[in-house]
Image (cartoon, grey):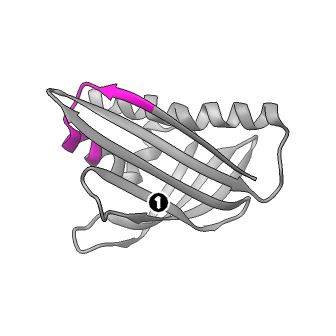
Amino acid sequence: MVDSAFETEVIAASADKCFGVAIDVERYPEWAPDIKEAVVRERDSQNRPVLVEYRASALGRSTHYTLKYDYANAPQQITWHLSQGDIMRSIDGSYEFEQSDANTKVTYSLSVELIVPLPGFIKRRAEGRILHTLKELKVRCES
């Protein structure tokens, strides 16, 4: 079963800065506590990460997955999907950036299907941690 969630934050920074922080995946371990390692395996002609291997903490264990990024609607949107993962069947996500004066409205969307179903209370706890990533992005962009 696919579980989906989304969150929106207004960030006191330009859309360009928010986009730049979002694509600087190698620095995620500095500000996203659940991401332990991010290794770029492939870049596009503009040096943006396209294929990224992650190691993250998830539900009390370490998980490995590789995401493929799409910049077709950049810099207004970044999307990604699962290329390979050990506990996930699918991951589809996006960041959308909407500039408004000196602020940017950022919407983070994520859909995940795990290989093994989890009880509802564990899924809700995991969803909260995942969506907290947007708050961490906000802090990083505003610093």
- Looking at the image, is 81 positioned above or below residue 136? below
Residue 137 on image: x %, y %: 39, 35
Q: Is residue 107 magenta?
A: no
From where the camera sits, is residue 115 visible? yes
Q: Is residue 15 magenta?
A: yes
Locate residue 121: give its quadrant. top right
Residue at position x 21%, y 36% from top? 99
Residue 74 on image: x %, y %: 26, 57
Residue at position x 81%, y 35% from top? 120
Residue at position x 40%, y 53% from top? 25
Residue 5 relative to residue 30: left or right: right
Mark 1 neighbour class, 10 Å CA radius: few under 14, some 14 to 19, many 20 or more: some
Residue 88 on image: x %, y %: 70, 59
Mark 1, secondary structure of its residue:
strand
Residue 107 on image: x %, y %: 40, 38
In the rendered image, the quadrant that contains the C terminus is top left
Residue extent of the magenta highlight:
8-19
Residue at position x 52%, y 62% from top? 81
- Looking at the image, is 103 positioned above or below residue 56? above
Residue 16 relative to residue 7: left or right: left
Relative to the observer, which residue lies in front, 140 or 71? 71
Residue 109 relative to residue 60: left or right: left
Report the amino acid beneath label 1. Trp
From where the camera sits, is residue 139 visible? no
Which residue does the numbered mark 1 point to in the structure image? Answer: 80
Q: Residue furthest left?
A: 101
